[in-house]
Image: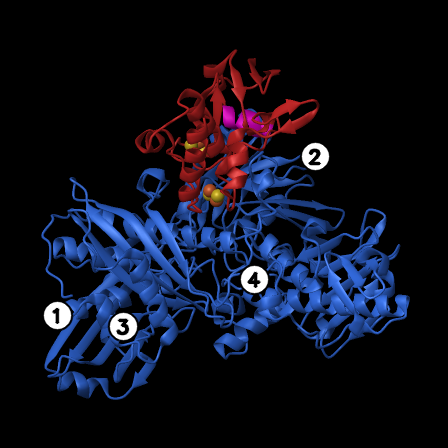
Amino acid sequence: MKINRRRFLLGTTVVGGGLLLGYASTRPSKHRIANESAGSEPFLTTWLRISEDNTVTVIVPHSEMGQGVHTSLPMMAADELDADWNLVKVEQAPATDLFANGVLVKGFAESLGVSFPRFLDGLATSATMKVAEIMNMQITGGSSSVRFTGELGMRAAGAAAREMLVKAAAARLDVPETELSTRLNYVHHDASGRSLSYGELASDAARFEPSSEPKLKDEKDFTLMGKSIARVDIPAKVDGTAAYGIDAEAPGMLYAAVKTAPVFGSKLQSVNADAALSRRGVVKVVELENAVAVVADNYWRAKQALAALDVQFEASENDQVNSQSIYAQYDTALEGELNEDIAEGDAANALENAETVVEATYRVPYLAHAAMEPMNCTVHFHDGKCDVWTGTQDNLGIRGRVATVAEMDENDVTLHGFYLGGGFGRRLPTDVNTIDQATLIAKHFDVPVKTLWSREDDMQQDYYRPAVTSKFRAGFDANNQLVAWQNHYIGKNEPAEAAHTPYSIANKDIAYADSETHIPFGAWRSVAHSQHTFFLESFVDELAHRSGQNPYQFRLNMLGDKPRHAAVLRAAAQKAGWGRNLAPGHAQGIALQESFGSIVAQVAEVSINNDGSVKVHRVSCAIDCGRTINPDAAASQVESGVIFGLTAALYGEITIENGRVQQTNFTDYEMIRLHDSPEIDIVSVDSGEALGGLGEPATPPIGAAVANAVYILTGQRVRELPLKNYRFTAAPVETAV
Amino acid sequence: MARFRVNGVERELDIEPDMPLLWALRDELGLKGTKFGCGIAACGACTVQVNGNPVRSCVTPVSAIEGTDIKTIEGLAVDVGGSKQLTAVQQAWIDHQVPQCGYCQSGMLMAVSALLEANPNPNDAEIDGAITNVCRCGTYPRIRRAIKSLSTTA
Ligand code: FES
Ligand code: FES
């Protein structure tokens, strides 16, 4: 075995033949080789395995939640390897330290210019988790898998393995390496017509040192990257065999239904369990600090018995909090001392001397994730060990969390990963209330216990996308030029640049106030961009209209130093036919944002229904994510992102009353369905720049694009979402051309 | 005692008559392909076919389906000489790369299969009226495309 300690590249022979190659970039001391046996073939957890039967196995350290990462990452390794895609198999990495997501952490750190990702701050500050654990994760989030694991890890592993196979072939055939070429799992010596399969060469190849600087392909030589490849996870998702955490099965398993204190932070006061315990199938009632659980032999029985319990929770100081009091608290905070975000030029002075000043206050409510698969986790304590079955965006992080809560050594905890029935940020290790409950409940048993939340639990015990208020003042000079931009908002979250507008404006004052509430918050698809893009791109639109300029041209004029943004904006406008004659009663709105390294512009075509609600007919979306690895899978991510953002814009609203969440289920937290899903046209503007994310960047702009169209149809500026709370009347506005 | 057929197999369960079919399928019969999403007939994740009609199993007590034929996602593909052959609807789901997280898709497939069985050429309004299932991943554009591809060739 050889370990290159500088580059953390590792190549070795598999017992029984074959080559294993891993590539990582965290400190080598964090890594040890996990010697797990998979059947008769001892198996080292790493990224690439070439077996003697000429198959290639790519081991993916990220969870599949529908974003196609179990396909796109193997494509990147296989392309560099010149592998035959038909001979490539995909496995998800087990939750062991070797897969600690150093590459991701490093990628984040570099892009943010900080030592570790701020969006994980929750972990660092939570009392039960140590900062050190941050470096010990398998995160699937931040639209990062392909960008970081793929670009820094998979491609290098594939390229290094290819070089080793060529070396092995050169030795075997006694020819110079330069006379050899690789295609579809074979090394060819064209001059002599001889060829050897990767399988035949794998064991020999393992004897060579993996290059610390493997040569990556030029884009023109890609054979897989850039092609639409069918996703490997899809067949199991059409015949009912795909297994999610909720489907975990273990012999003797019991089911827990839980009632948690409705006011966050409140505690359990008393339980009268008599009525529940006498019911069929009920095994035990378990009291937790802020919840009570009924454990039975069937989930429905547990849930029925839970409803029969007499439960009291303690009164809490938060019982009086409601959405209005939170907004009032925000307003007060914005009057107080602010923290600087961006200060360029002299905005105060520019506003003072401006010819025209435009002011507006925007806000958006809390939002729930509402992943389709309700939260769940199955835990089994036995023989001093613990098995955990759950779908998570971070297998290692959750393993660590269970160990912490159970006060066990992490190495005694085994995490069995599953497909995720939606992630969207809800299944990150910052959002662990279900995991904690499941662990504490299972501690009372020596059989596996599946804790399953109802939809109501999920909606009322989430880590919400925070409600935010954002105040703007902007000034135009005598020449109708935008010269001052002031934006004061609540709460700076990840990504740090979410409130930064791309437009060149000479004087900027962007600042924020912190204003804590008792409502738990977490990462929600596109994180802080989901609020700020609505604010920024709506207010910019207001400014265009106020200064008598076409909203598209107004933006374009301020993008002189941002050619990529300008190109994306133009591409969206062109795709939508911006300014063309539309059907009567229709209008278009436009919005632009860069997030997670990708730039997205959207044009929404909108009309007002007879009942005054909003109908979105078509969304034209241009995206520059640098380069697209799997175009069809990328398109589905963009479609998904648009619909996710549009659901929030039209319907999304979590309100607080008496300290608790009022919404309960899909009846009062509505979702877009087939009938109100718009047509979506996508244009890729591949600039060839560094890879950007795909899972999130299509979500932020859509709210503003739709609201900007609503303004043209009605003359009413929407400064608060969701749109379901309005009854509009058509009153078209003249727009500049 | 509840009696019904599931995917052609006779089943007899000693369960409460008011237990919803969803939990009988999942927790008593171990058929996990049918999913729980909301429990109140608001999302369609739990859709199965009862005598060919789409039904939300989370609100259907087993007493209401006594003696019926239940088809779940596991019973959609047809057995051809010992191997499972996907239905045209399932194949269209692959061809159009419909599923993302996939969690809603069992219910979607059961609802769409029932629709196309009853109406092989649905127009947009008929599709919208029949398929009211929630897909949080927003696979709707592909669902519509896949349905259309089936109805034009039907
Ligand atoms: S789970 Fe039955 S309709 Fe949602
Ligand atoms: S594919 Fe995820 S909910 Fe539909």
Which chain did the image draw in blue? A
Numbered disc in front, either 1 or 2: 1
Could you say which is closer to the camera, residue A693 or residue A287? A693
Per the picture, the main secondary structure of the magenta-coloured stretch is helix
Disc 3 to disc 2, C-alpha distance? 62 Å
Residue situated in front as seen by the camera: A189 or A274: A189
Tag of residue A548: 1
Counting every numbered tag in the picture gives 4
The residue at which mark 2 appears reads as A251
> What's the residue at 56%, 72% (across, down)?
A107
Q: Which residues are magenta?
A: B21-27
What percent of the width, then of the height, locates residue A484?
21, 81
Residue A558: x and y, percent? 27, 77
Instruction: Tell which tag, 3 or 2, sits nearer the viewer.
Output: 3
**Of the residues tagged 4 and 3, which is closer to the observer?**
3
| Mark 4 lies on residue | A145
Element assignment for label 3 = helix
Of the image marks 4 and 1, the number of the one nearer the N terminus? 4
Q: Crowding at label 4, few (<14), some or many (≥20) Cα neighbours within 10 Å?
A: many
- The percent coordinates of residue A487 (x first, y second) are 26, 74
Give a yes or no on whether discs 1 and 2 share a subunit: yes
Q: Amino acid at mark 2?
A: Pro
Answer left or right for A7 relative to A169: left
